[in-house]
Amino acid sequence: MVICQVWLLLISGLVFMPAFAQDSDSETSNNTMKNTEYVTFYPSYGYQDEGLWRIPLRVWVHKHGGWGGKQLSKVAKRVVRNKAGLEELHQDQIEMFRFRFRDFVADSQSFEAIFLRFDQDPDEEVFRLQSADGDKRTNFNGLLFGELTLTFERAEELLTAQQSKNGWLRFTATGKDHQGEGAVRLIKPQGDSVISDIDDTVKITEITEGEAVVMMNTFFKPFQAVPQMKALYQTFDENVALHYVSGGPWQMYRPLADFLFKTAGFPPGSMHMKNVRLHLLEGETYGDFYRLIKLGSVASEQQKIRQISEIFSHFPQRGFTLIGDSGEHDPEVFAHIRNQFPEQVNAIIIRDVVNDATKNPERLQGMKVIQADSAFIDADG
C-alpha cells in the first residue's frame, strides 16, 4: 500500500499541471537539438501466431528541456525532499532526482507517426507502426500501442544479419527529428521463462519501511540490487526468457532499465509497468487516476494479473517461474496465475521481506521462500 501512496502523491500533483510541462535535461543542452523528439521503445517480445511473428510495442514520443518542466521539477523536488525527511540536498542527489523524475514532466508529443528500421537490414525496409484499431499516430499522451508482424523467413533474415543471440533484434527510429532505439526478443513457443517483480525482489526499495524510506530510495540514493537475487538470476541459462512486471509507473522505466541491465547486470527482458497517463485531454488519464485513488494497491495487483496472463496466453507451451516478494501482493498475484495456468507454472519463488514464512505460512503455501537476509539460493532449490 505504501508504494501506491507514494505514486499517488506524485501523480496527483502532476496530472493537474499544464500538459506542456517539460524537464531540464542534458539531452537538450545543445540548442541544435531543440527540435529533436525522443522516441522510447519499451523492451518487448515477439510470439508466433498464425504463421507470423507478432511483436506488440509500446512507444512514447516526447521532448525534454522546457521551462515549464524545469519549474515543475523544482517544485516536485522540494515536495519529495520533504517527504523523504531531508533538509538539504547534495549536488549528486539533485542530479539523481532530475534524471529519475524527468519523464514525469516531459512534453509528450501527440499526432506523431512512428517509423523504424531494423539494424543491418539488407533491404533497409522502413516499418510504420500502427495499432490493432488502425491508429497510426500517437495520442495526447504521446503514446502509440502498436504491433509489427514478420514472416518467419524475414525474421530469420534479420536475425542472421544482426548475428543475433537468443532472438534479440535491434531497431532504430527513422522519422523526421526522431531519435530512439529499441530491442525486441523473438521467443520460441517452447522453453523456460521467468516473470519477475522489481521492487524489493531484485532492487532494494524497502516498501515496508514507509513513505520516507521509499522516497529516499527511489529518488535520492543509488539503486541497489538484492545481492542473493542478482546471484540467482545470473545462474539462468541464456535461453531463458525474462519478463519484468512492476507496479511502478512507466515514467520510471528509464532509470530502472539503466540500473537493471547496465549497472547491476540482470539479464535483459521485456518490461511491463503501470499506466499513469497525465494529459488532461486524454480520456484514459482519468481512468488511470481513478484507479490509483480508488483501488490503491489493488490496482497494481489487477495490473500484474492482466499483464502476466497476457504473456502466458502468448506462450501456452512454455513453462514459467514466477519470482516476487512478500512485501505487497506478489504471493496473491502468483497464486491467481497458478490457478489460472496450472500446467505452465513450474515454480513460484518469493523473497520474504515481512517474515510471512513464520507469521503467515498459509500465504506462501506451495511457494519456494527466500529469506530476505539469505546469502544465495539456487533456482532448483
Image (spheres, rainbow, N blue to C red):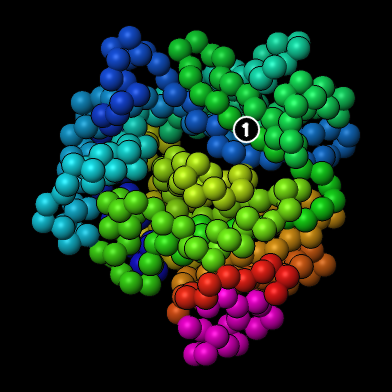
Question: Is residue 368 inside the magenta stretch?
Answer: yes
Is 360 left or right of 104, judged from the image as shown? right
Viewer-proximal residue among 109 and 325: 325
> Quadrant of the rendered structure where residue 168 is?
top right
Is 184 left or right of 28, judged from the image as shown? right
**What is the x, y in percent for residue 146?**
63, 31
Which quadrant holds the N terminus?
bottom left
**What is the x, y in percent for residue 263?**
47, 45
* 254 to 191, vertically: above or below: above
At mark 1, the secondary structure is: strand
**What is the x, y in percent for residue 7?**
35, 55
Question: Is residue 17 inside the magenta stretch?
Answer: no
Which quadrant holds the C terminus?
bottom right
> Quadrant of the rendered structure where residue 25 is?
top left
At x 66% / y 35%, what residue is drawn? 184
Provide the residue designation for mark 1. 183
> Quadrant of the rendered structure where residue 135 is?
top right
Magenta stretch: give its range.
Answer: 355-371
* 37 to 351, vertically: above or below: above
Viewer-proximal residue among 57 and 259: 259
* 42 to 286, vertically: above or below: above
Res. 285 in view: no
